[in-house]
């Protein structure tokens, strides 16, 4: 089983993640942001990853520190589970609709962190949650997990639907990329290593 447990404690935040890539989509998520909890549960459910995540932080100052550290810790957990890349598909993509929104997410477990984030939302806030924090979350996650991640919102008028399609798409694309291919031997690269 490809599992990781990561904790991060700073003067600003405290985050704990348990991730199992070979799960069933079970999740227990508790952060100060109900909207982000909802997004992460969609990622877990549709990626078939078991995810337990708890976070607290100095949200009285700003959401930024806590959202960033959630991305860092989840990225670290993902990177740890991907240490042994032998025999995985490496690439994954998903095109996910949610009502009027359509998102396309592509993943490469390249070992080279890179994020493309083409997401234009009609509103910046969902209740009190700043939707710009999602871009920062994915930047932190891709940097720490060392994956290449392309997120393209093709269209959508409701920010909730748009972001939910993105998180579900990320789960599906990552699931596809991390599956074992019984034919592949060694690293999925012509270099012979990642």
Image (cartoon, rainbow, N blue to C red):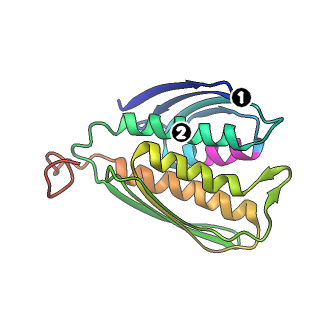
Residue 133 on the magenta span? no
Q: Is residue 73 above or below residue 169?
A: above
- Per the rendered image, the range of residues in magenta is 35-42
Assign the N terminus to one quadrant of the image: top left
Image disc number at residue 56: 1
Residue at 39 percent of width and 47 percent of height: 146
Q: Residue 23 location in percent, x, y?
A: 45, 35
Which residue is drawn at the image coordinates 70% and 44% (left, top)? 64
Residue 180's label in the rendered image is none
Q: SS of the residue at dot 1?
A: strand
On screen, 175 above or below 29?
A: below
Name the image quarter holding residue 59: top right
Q: Residue at x 37, y 35 (%)?
A: 81
Could you tell me which secondary element the residue under label 2 belongs to? helix
> What's the mark number on residue 72?
2
Q: Where is residue 118? Give x, y as percent.
A: 58, 70
Q: Say whether residue 50 is left or right of residue 65.
A: left
Q: Which circle's residue, 2 or 1, is located before the other in the chain?
A: 1
């Amino acid at each position: 089983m490809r599992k990781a447990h990561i904790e991060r404690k700073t003067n600003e935040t405290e985050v704990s993640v348990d991730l199992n890539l070979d799960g069933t989509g079970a999740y227990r998520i508790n952060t100060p942001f109900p909207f982000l909890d909802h997004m992460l549960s969609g990622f877990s459910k549709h990626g078939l990853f078991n995810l337990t995540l708890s976070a607290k932080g100095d949200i009285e100052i700003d959401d930024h520190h806590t959202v960033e550290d959630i991305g860092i810790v989840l990225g670290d957990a993902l990177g740890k589970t991907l240490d042994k890349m032998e025999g995985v598909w490496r690439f994954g993509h998903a095109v996910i609709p949610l009502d009027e929104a359509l998102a396309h997410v592509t993943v490469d477990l390249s070992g080279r962190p890179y994020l493309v984030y083409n997401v234009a939302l009609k509103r910046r806030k969902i209740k009190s949650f700043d939707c710009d924090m999602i871009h920062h979350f994915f930047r932190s996650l891709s940097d720490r997990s060392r994956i290449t991640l392309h997120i393209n919102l093709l269209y959508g008028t409701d920010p909730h639907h748009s972001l939910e399609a993105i998180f579900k798409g990320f789960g599906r694309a990552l699931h596809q990329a991390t599956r074992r291919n019984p034919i592949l031997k060694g690293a999925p690269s012509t270099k012979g290593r990642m």
